[in-house]
Image (tube, helix red, strand yellow):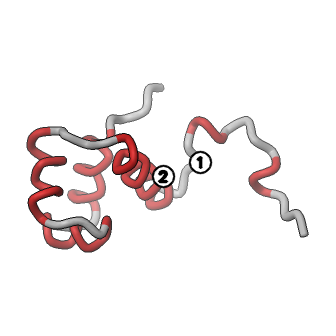
Amino acid sequence: MSEPSPREMLEWISETYEMGPDALARMFQRNRCTINAWMHEGRISVENGARIRSSFYYLTNRRPPALSGCTTVDSFMP
């Protein structure tokens, strides 16, 4: 199964949680124009894509594919 694009992840967050551009802007600490560019034009930087990806996997309560083989994530090291 392939991972959705950051734009698809953002659309999922918006639809699932009924968030408009203003709410998404607050969530990602960006302005509304930036959110509109992400949604309509797909212009998402690597850094912002990582933010969206992190939020998407947190909200879906799933582990990102890159971390599936990591066993130390669930263990605590003092």
Callout 1 secondary element: loop
**Image mark count:** 2
At 31% from the left and 65% from the top, the residue drawn is 28
Quick check: can you spot residue 18?
no
At 84% from the left and 64% from the top, the residue drawn is 76
Nearest the eye: 47 or 17? 47
Q: Is residue 64 left or right of residue 11?
A: right
Amino acid bearing label 2: Tyr
Quick check: can you spot residue 60?
yes
* Residue designated by label 2: 57
Q: Is residue 1 left or right of residue 68?
A: left
The residue most toward the right is 78
* Residue designated by label 1: 63
For residue 55, the mark is none
Q: CA distance from mark 1 to mark 2?
A: 6 Å
Q: Residues within 10 Å of mark 2 (few under 14, many from 20)?
A: some
The residue most toward the top is 1
Amino acid bearing label 1: Arg
Nearest the eye: 72 or 17? 72
At 81% from the left and 45% from the top, the residue drawn is 71
Verify CB contact (< 8 Å) between mark 1 and mark 2.
Answer: yes
Q: Could you tell me residue 45's position as x and y percent?
A: 30, 42
